[in-house]
Image: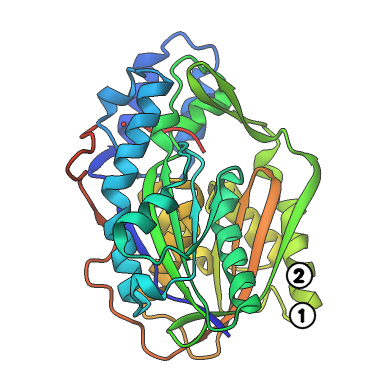
Amino acid sequence: MTTLCRPAIAVPEHVITREQTLDLARSLHPDHPQLPLALRLIGNTGVETRRLVRPIEETLRHPGATVLNAIYEAESKARVPDVVRRALANGELEPEDIDLIVYVSCTGFMMPSLTAWLINTMGFRPETRQLPIAQLGCAAGGSAINRAHDFCSAYPGSNVLIVACEFCSLCYQPTDLGVGNLLSNGLFGDAVAAVVMRGEGGTGVRLQHNGSHLVPGTEKWISYVIRDTGYHFMLDKRVPGTMSMLAPAMRELADRHEWDISGLDFYIVHAGGPRILDDLCHYLGLPPEMFRYSRATLTERGNIAAAVVLDALDRLFADGGVADGARGVIAGFGPGITAEISLGSWTGGPVVPEVTGSVAVPAGRGATAAGPAVAG
């Protein structure tokens, strides 16, 4: 059986609070006809702080797509290796033990993928397989877990490293002034996360079933438009109501395997916003505290795209885990509208200690020191 071990998380050193975000919206858009609505929406996100890869004043200037993508590459190479090393240590593995690296990111582009650079610089075997996932947005964290599970099931005894690198602030577009864009400016944050899935042994979530669900006709509800200035985030006003369509998909997958989706012991789900979590409580008949790890991620980090589920999972580990055999679900939601759902149970006994925990890691040599908050 495959086991998802303890993730490692790192967030950048630059912090922006909800009040600072609201003040920026007031000062940058004083004449916006829907400013009161935008301020109310930002105030209701539940996000208290976010971390940014560059200072806010640098992000607001938008130096152009070429410079921003160069920053993405430099910051990725500076910040990812330490997180990878900690994730490997959490899984009690070495680079040569890894058979597949899954890299997820929707906030910058590299070809070859960062996976090639990691293999060349961190001691992974040249035979290590690579799977970059770039276009599933926030759902990619759940997708990476599911594809890793599939790989370990197809090749018993294999080990997979998952890396999520999301610098949402690099996608800030100062000319995008729709209410959805202003809301996004106050919702998204930056983070890097990594986790090991072991084909044998390990402490964590033993994955047993997984599935995907696409809501027909919703592919334009969350999207990027690519322009000369880079990625422009498009968010349909109907997105907050999507749990009415995705919660039944979660229940159907659980029913198929004779699990009760409303009777599980832990829930690790994508925290796209408070409405997502509140609606899941309603449709699954659960008390709010069942989503406490996802809510904590949203409050402290904002929506960190594909890294959300890994950050929330790390909080479960930090809380001591759960009883051996306890059942739970991990689910990521994103463009499509897509849900990636995993069912598993706790295994392995005591939690592996994480030496440095979820820390802010400054840029290393060769990285820029420099961002606000948008994208996804």
- Describe residue 154's horizontal placement relative to residue 117 as left or right: right
The structure residue drawn at horizontal position 56% and vertical position 65%, both measured from the top left corner, is: 145
Position of 121 relative to 49 (above/below): below
Label 1 crowd (10 A; few <14 / some 14-19 / many >=20): few
Q: Position of residue 148 (x, y in %)?
A: 57, 68
Q: Amino acid at mark 2?
A: Leu
Q: Position of residue 341 (x, y in %)?
A: 65, 64
Residue occupying the far left of the picture:
365
The structure residue drawn at horizontal position 62% and vertical position 52%, both measured from the top left corner, is: 333
Mark 2 highlights which residue? 253
- Describe residue 256's horizontal placement relative to residue 156 as left or right: right
- Front-most of residues 362 and 96: 96
- Describe residue 195's horizontal placement relative to residue 276 as left or right: left
Position of 367 relative to 254 (above/below): above
> Considering the image in quadrants, where does the N terminus appear?
bottom right
Instruction: Indicate the secondary structure of the residue bearing disc 2.
Output: helix
> Between marks 1 and 2, how big is the CA–CA gap?
7 Å
Q: Position of residue 309 (x, y in %)?
A: 50, 60
Label 2 crowd (10 A; few <14 / some 14-19 / many >=20): many
Position of 284 relative to 347 (above/below): above
Tell me whether the residue at label 1 lies in contact with that at label 2, contact meaning CB atoms closer than 8 angstroms. Answer: yes
The structure residue drawn at horizontal position 53% and vertical position 46%, both measured from the top left corner, is: 273
Q: Can I make out residue 17 in this image?
A: no
- Specify the label residue 222 is tagged with: none
Mark 1 highlights which residue? 257
Q: Can I make out residue 360 in this image?
A: yes
Position of 359 relative to 170 (above/below): below
Instruction: Indicate the secondary structure of the residue bearing disc 1.
Output: loop
